[in-house]
Amino acid sequence: MLRLDTLRQHAAHKKLSSCYLFFGEEEHLKSQMVRSLAVAFLGSDPPGSGLEVLYGSETDGGQIVDRAMSLGMFAQRTMLVVREADALSAKSRAAVAGYLAAPNPDACLVLTTVKPDARSALVRQFDPVASVVNFKPMTEPEAADWARAEASRRGLRLTAEAAQSLVARAGTDLGVLDGELAKLAVHAGGAAIGAGEVRALAGSNLQYGDYELADAVSRGQRRESLAIYQTMISAGEDPVRILASICSGMLRLWKVASAPGDPAAVARSTGIHEYAVRQLLPAARRRTRAEYADALGRIYRAECRLKSGRGEPAALVQRLIHHLTTQSLRKA
């Protein structure tokens, strides 16, 4: 498998393969890498007319091969990106596999998909060492590092705590993080961005409410938890989705509580950023194993009731929040 940092080096030195297979769930990073390859291969920024994008659900293998073998009227090189490559028919995949055996040296073909079929002749035709890249979802530490690097590229100064706070609120999807960085850039005015600024400015997306609620529940802050919940319900949030965020937060606490060692060791074993671990540890270790089992059991039963239509959804989740915060307060 070709490492992403190695591919970046290849792009920087303009030493590219004729064909690539990009797979995985991190679409924003795929798009960034496609652009970097296009700039390196075509020699212009923006890439211009030499770049063409097709979709596997809307084209066939014959068209892909024809496009890859022919150049535009004014282009000396061409870069062809085929998104949704998994949607190609068996006949189309065979045609593209045949092209890969003898590709046009003046063309760069990039196929993108989420989960390729490793058994297909098309996938096997790619050299896994030189041209197959896995764009897997980032861990929290990786996403925080990416956010700081991207902020620096935009001329922003994002502290480590601010980056982790942003990831905790927005998640690890780089497309979402990119949008939040754009908002921060508008308001920062050249000043350093700390965790306080992130809390103030990154609050308009839905996950912010999720994060604040899960955080308040984890700390046993019953009054604050219920107030946040009522605000979310009044804003039209779905109780089922809110329950999912509470479950995610409780599982996160349980992972931190169960991992042995100091914060650095817990961060390594759980894949959670050390800054977040330090924030979570006091609340995480206030519950016993039995209390975690009870809490997760109650969450599961509440989910079953919601999905089976037994009980009023908003009231069910409210009662659950009341119990979870009362439970943690017993050990405060």
Image (tube, helix red, strand yellow):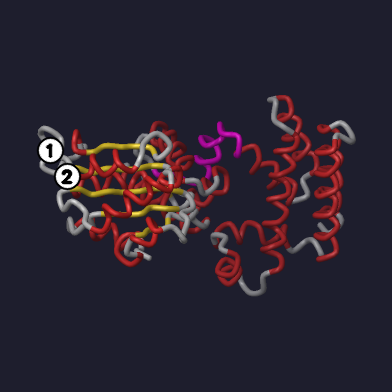
Taking the spot 84% from the left edge, 54% from the top edge, the residue there is: 297
| Above or below 255: residue 147 | above
- Across and down, in percent, residue 3 comes to 36, 63
Q: Nearer the viewer, residue 29 or 53?
A: 53
User: Given the image, on which type of amino acid does mark 2 rest?
Assistant: Leu
- Across and down, in percent, residue 48 comes to 19, 34
| Above or below 77: residue 233 | above
Label 2 belongs to which residue? 42
Q: Residue furthest bottom?
A: 261
What secondary structure is marked by label 1? loop
- Across and down, in percent, residue 6 comes to 30, 63
Q: Nearer the viewer, mark 2 or mark 1?
A: 1
User: Disc 2 vs disc 1: Cβ atoms closer than 8 Å?
Assistant: yes
What's the magenta region?
A: 192-207
Label 1 belongs to which residue? 75
Taking the spot 66% from the left edge, 40% from the top edge, the residue there is: 210
- Image mark count: 2
| Above or below 47: residue 234 | above
Crowdedness near tag 1: few (<14), some (14–19) or many (≥20) residues, C-alpha within 10 Å:
some
Give the mark nearer the N terminus: 2 vs 1: 2
- Across and down, in percent, residue 314 comes to 81, 32
- Left or right of 298, for residue 119: left
- Left or right of 27, for residue 34: left
